[in-house]
Amino acid sequence: MIPSLLLKPFEFLLLSSLLLFIFPLPISPYTQISIGSDCPNTANYAANSTYETNLNLLFSSLSFNTSFTGFSNLTIVENPNIIYGLAQCGGDTTPDACRDCLTTASQEIVKNCLSKTAIAWFDSCLLRYSDQQIFSSSDNRPMFCKWNAINASDDYKLSLEQMMKGLASRAAFGPSKLMYATNETNSTNFPTIYGLVQCTNDLSRSDCNLCLQDAIVQIPTCCYDKQGGRVIGPSCNLRYETYKFYDNLAKSQAPSPPLPNPLTNTTTAERKRSSSRTTVIIIVPIVVAVMLISTIVACLLRRKKSKPVIDKGIEGNDQESLKFDLGTIRAATDNFFEDNKLGEGGFGAVYKGRLSDGQEIAVKRLSRHSGQGLEEFKNEVALIAKLQHRNLVRLLGCCIEGEEKLLIYEYVPNASLDKFLFDPNKKANLDWQRRYKIIGGVARGLLYLHEDSRLRIIHRDLKASNVLLDVEMNPKIADFGMARIVGVDQTQGNTNRIAGTYGYMAPEYAMHGQFSVKSDVFSFGVLLLEIVTGQKNRDFYQSDRSEDLPSYVWKHWKDSTVLELIDPTISESFSSSEVMRCIHIALLCVQEDVIDRPTMSSIVLMLNSFSMSLSAPSQPAFFIASRMAPDMSMTESHTQTREVNQSPGMASPWSVNEVSITELDPR
């Protein structure tokens, strides 16, 4: 991923003016074709305002930087405003055409849109900005399609599907730094198909692949019976035609084969000589510009590192922009009115609120006697402020005033997964397709935490009640107060404070304080088995059964009767091959030997590729210390989190000095 630059307006102005003075932008001969735009009216800025001035500065720098690199993302900060900007050009676009396309796109946006969030798609480029964080997160809304009028044969459709899947894999995992790939088919039965796919360069490679797979799924509903079509979204796009529409300096992107340009009579030799001259003219300024930009950015970053830490450990411009005023939160929640309470947990209460602009929020109000003190609070803020992924709950802000410590999150309307999965009346809303989607979303969220975020993060408390469901039943992993940051090259660690939920904790963590990314993998395996069977792992501890859920499933796996365990609610909707594969993956996750458990990157591949063979699982981990002690019995509606103070390596985790009960409804 290419990191974004965080600059203040005067720094943008200095950089842009200096570069434009040295390298004035040439007038490009390329005609730019608009594909579409999105300008929601949810929040607008005033014409001729400071926001518009900053937006123009952002566009100027994006246009210049992207023309050299093909992609750039920048952030401009001026309290209380912050603008995130992103630009990308096609992998076959020349620097001149790229710069001209982005200049045209920025002019169109300023002319036609006053929204604080907008996207413009042009033939050769994408330009996007927002007052909300948009980097490093795959976004497939809005997504739209275009197609031509010529019908396609069945053989054409089959070949198209195979080619597009191959292109998605090449763009996501191939050598191209721009996550870009093209290909063509050769057949005597139908015309040659030319295809192109590309992701924005801020995505991880796994998210790029998932974004393109989502786009490919749209083809049958929009343009499957056509010989040409394209699917376009904020984070990725694809296109196919029966003519070569890429790799041309002056491309024609009309939905039918291009006609010769009557104004162009240049010979091939002349074009080559012109191309050589253009190459020389472009390369020299690029080298000088890169050196200049590197020097300026290094100076700016050095100056930023010397800034003092502010406000009790919540530091930097990003955190400053996240701060809410206590009066604003009191007004949003009707002064924490009891009817607005969504749930009560060991760390405090959660309230629903509504900001003055109509946005719904969830406010986590830490109890003054909470087990989560200032350190855990700052930990959660510092963590989530740096994380942006569609399968993680989004932190909107925080507040520390007097004795109040508040976290402000996006409101997730459908409560947590356990409220549906273990409720006899609600579980019917979770058919197999939704459950499989939830499994994949949780896996991608954990993969982001472990490998694709700027930090390597171990959650340590993954469970059904910490997976929230949005209005479309998409999963979002929540509650990062327990999470631990480890080094980029570090995959494990020890702790003398064991925090988590029995039944989900890996044995090496519960018994010896040894946590790692494989601890989260173990928890994911237990969660996966709960989703498939519809049974709580904790119910096994509270019954007279002699094993936990993984051991119970293992016994049926050995007897080849595992399908008998499937939740009866999904008996009419499940795919036996998908269910068996999920159980197989879950058993691999809960193996006793840490080394034998797969990584989350392998798990995501297993869930998405049925051609990938799986190794045979060994017997799941089972340890008597995980059994519920008499003082741990609870009502069905509660989820228990137990913290144990001990030294790493102790054999027994029964020195218990705090119990935290969490019961959260929709947030």
Image: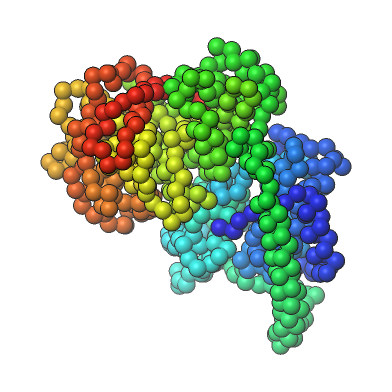
In the image, what residue occupies the spot 27% across and 18% down? 631
Q: How many labels does the image show?
A: 0
In the image, what residue occupies the spot 55% across and 22% down? 365
Q: Where is residue 445 in the image (x, y as percent from the top left)?
A: 45, 43
Nearest the eye: 292 or 582: 292
- Image height check: is 651 above or below 627? below
Q: Left or right: where does residue 441 sit relative to residue 28?
A: left
Q: Left or right: where does residue 8 sit relative to residue 196?
A: right
Nearest the eye: 572 or 555: 555
Q: Position of residue 238 (x, y in %)?
A: 56, 57
Residue lying at the far top in this picture: please name it: 338
In the image, what residue occupies the spot 45% across and 71% down? 187
Which quadrant is home to the N terminus? bottom right
Q: Is residue 579 visible?
A: no
Q: Is residue 464 visible?
A: yes
Residue 299 lies in what quarter of the image?
Answer: bottom right
Q: Left or right: where does residue 470 sit relative to residue 492?
A: right
Residue lying at the far left in this picture: please name it: 559
Residue 268 lies in what quarter of the image?
Answer: bottom right
Q: Where is residue 111 in the image (x, y as percent from the top left)?
A: 82, 47
Residue lying at the far bottom in this picture: please name it: 269
Indicate the colouring scheme: rainbow
Residue lying at the far right in this picture: please name it: 48
- Image height check: is 558 above or below 232? above
Q: Left or right: where does residue 17 sit relative to residue 436?
A: right
Q: Position of residue 546 (x, y in %)?
A: 14, 29
In the image, what residue occupies the spot 69% across and 65% down? 294
Nearest the eye: 633 or 278: 633
